Image (cartoon, coloured by chain):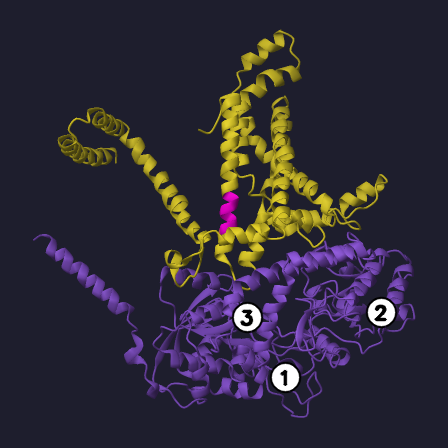
Amino acid sequence: MQRLSRAFSNKVLTKMKGMIGVMKFHAGPGLPKKSKLRQLLLDVDRGRQLYLLMMLPVAYILIFKYQPMYGALIAFKDFDPTAGIWGSTWVGLKHFVRFIEQPKFFQMVSNTLMLALWDSIIGFPVPILLALALNNVAHKKYKSFVQTVTYAPHFISTVVIVGMLTQLLHPRMGALNLLFQHFGVPAVSYLGKAGYFRPVYTLSGVWQNAGWGSIIYLAALSSVDVELHQAAQIDGASIVQRTRHIDLPAIMPSIIILLILRIGSLMNVGFEKVFLMQNQLNLTTSEVISTYVYKMGIMSQFPDYSYATAIGLFNSVVNVVLLVIVNTTAKKASETSLW
Amino acid sequence: MRRKPAAVVVFLITLSILIGVLPTGIASENSSILNPPGQLPLVNQETELTMMLGYYPFLVSDIDTHYAAKEIEKRTGIKLKIELVDYQQVSERVTLMLNAGDELPDIITAARMSLAQINFYGAKGVFAPLESLIFQSGYWIKDIFERYPDVERQSYAWDGHIYVVPRYAENAINSYGAKLWINNRWLSNLGLDMPATTDELYSVLKAFKEQDANGNGDPTDEIPLTTAKNLWYGHVGGPLMTPFIYDNTGDQLIVEDGKIVPAYIADEWREGLKYINNLYKEGLLDSECYTQDTNTMKPLFLSDVQTAGAVLVGKMTNIVPSAQQELWQDYVLVPPLMGPSGEKPLTCFVPPAIRSDSGSVINAKSGKAEIAFRLLDYFWSEESRLITCYGEENVDWRRPTDPSIPGVDGQPAFMEILHSFGAPELENKLFGDNFTYFETEKFVGGQIAKEGDADQFTYSQVMEKLVGFEPERVVPSVLPIPDEYVEEFNGLSVSIQSYVNQSKAMFVAGEMDISSDEAWLAYLEQFDNYALDRYLEIMNIAYGTYLK
């Protein structure tokens, strides 16, 4: 296999060298450029096995991530399947204007942002705290028990989670309400009040995903040198001080990268869960962009692909802008960033 | 010189593609192989058609041995090459095939496409117009059109063509969909009469709440009136709102002086909301009616002691299993209630209408359109419906042995069911509702009564209590919206309906104060932002076309 790939790349290289020769002949005085190219080709040659390995993922990304972007064109067209993507008529920003002129536009965008912020502000730090706490548990069996218990809910499907929520939060039969009533708190229909939608969504999300989210931090924490802790202990540092000054800085780069990634998909709040938790009474806070797209684009009598695509594109543009802002800020503040 | 062979090859390939694209059927379209309309088999020599069929995976396990598929082939003489596609994915599949420029099969059945979509593609020349075929060589469809002018009228697209052979089912259980069921045993336990007015309903529900209606010694465990979200006709309104103003629980529009107008801006609507809000406030209407799903509500009906007094639902068997008669037999229908105006009570009624979701269309580029049409024509025969939804004669169902035996509707019976839908004997035999058909009332009402059959019970309840109370004129379920408005109309109707339903719920639950004039005016003012006028304008244009 190795021999084969080497033979293959040698062949390619000789061909390319030939091409360079031709270019040299034509390029005349452009010396620095030409040597740069040659340098590159030499690099490629040196790491040809790595390049070969990389070809597959690159092809995957090109085919499955870049090529479909061509379809985003229909956001600017009136898509007609019989005419195809290219053949449909251009309508400019019509669908974007339609979206913005929606009476519910501001409500939807702010609902989406608010839900995402709740989810980030509460949902993001919890796995970090959990990981830091778990890291300090000395009893191995207890630690792995807690870990398993906390990440098990991650594997329950959204439909089941929402079913469990409706059962748990039911004012008459729900375990939670019965428990609260025991302590004198009156029964509340948590799913039927718009004001409770965000807390219920966020906290159930924390319950479901905190354990799973802490795994990556635990992995980062395992690389912390034990000697650092021992030295600090000799100096009389408490657990809190050691966590603050040894563990936290150790996982800071992971935290920042994960934060940036999270902000990059801030607008993509979990469609499924929001949609399933929706009812007529909490729509004022639970109608988000993605559920609206679903209702307009898929569920309606006449699937409006162009409109749905335009809204999706709007969403993605907001995400990209947020990603760039956060990345730049992170770069300046902490020298950790995606690029 | 070296290039030449390549050019020849390219030329040949292009040529062969062009030939492939040309309508291959020009020569094969030959009406002489067709027998006269209405005569079986449909063709006098072997013919093959390709067909894409949206199907329920639980009904078809092997299409090569499937009873209905084989039986249709046998009777019509047409060999079917069926491509099965999960019913939820057919519409998407067709869109993708069109987008990719792939050739469609001769017939597409049960594509789950809306009429608007089919008519859009039809106008683009994707699906063949059928009206001339219907009148020239149709037999079953033509006959039905003559007997059911409404069905013919609904079939036309805005451009005057017919692009789909839809499905049509007369079924009183569905037409009188929104129903209010009450626990008859509780009524007799407390010595109460069946309520006939809104005020009487209020006092009955109040008695349910305050007294020990279920007789278990605990007067507090009764839930007087309940329903759940996503339950079939579990809409809070309908029979509760109609005594004030007619509420069809869907688009909530009414016909007044030949025009379509919204019910939800009328003062009577506000009165109705006040009434329902009062039920909600006093705990007579379950506070969880908007938030609980059917599964959360079920325990009220499944426990040893009944704890639900009344429920808004299309069929009791949407909540409890139809096999457990003891769970549904106590719930009977409340007849339409008289409102404060004292006018004749009305019931919610959705007239039977054509449905395109399991209709059939013909590929306009198929060379065998005429043969394909004959097959669709046959789909509307009684025989085809019996084969595809009830199974084999004398095995799964049979004609009544004695013509004097009455059916559920009291008329002479039409058939006797031997194996009910879902029975293991019917495995890999039927297509059910995912097939094009025309079904009249007698398929349900003409069945010989079977003890403990929940559907038959519901049917006789509807016949007894609701039939005859439908309003004179209702908004048709199918309106030919002109093509140029389809996109706009679709957007408007989705957002307006969602606003109406949301506000209705908020008023009922007291999140918005129905007694405050300010809140009511603010609610009405919002309709300007939703362009209600424009929505009604388009609706009335379509209604005008429909009436013509």
Q: Residue B378 versus residue B131: which sits nearer the camera?
A: B131
Q: Residue B392 versus residue A180: which sits nearer the camera?
A: A180
| Percent coordinates x, y for residue B95 in the rendering | 44, 62
- Residue that protrudes farthest toward the left in the picture: B1
Find the magenta span and give its range: A310-316
Secondary structure under the numbered disc 3 in the rendered image: loop
- Which chain appears yellow? A
**What hue does chain B carry in this figure?**
purple
- The answer for which chain carries disc 1 is B
- Separation of marks 3 and 2 at Cα, in angstroms: 37 Å
User: Which residue is tagged 2?
Assistant: B198
Co-location on one chain, circles 3 and 1: yes
- The answer for which chain carries disc 3 is B
Give amino acid for label 1.
Lys
- Sequence-wise, the earlier of marks 3 and 2 is 2
Q: Say which mark, if any, is on residue A283.
A: none
Check disc 2: other Cα within 10 Å, few if <14, some if 14-19, many if 20+. many
Q: Quadrant of the C terminus of chain B?
A: bottom right
Q: Residue B287 versus residue B319: which sits nearer the camera?
A: B287
Check disc 3: other Cα within 10 Å, few if <14, some if 14-19, many if 20+. many
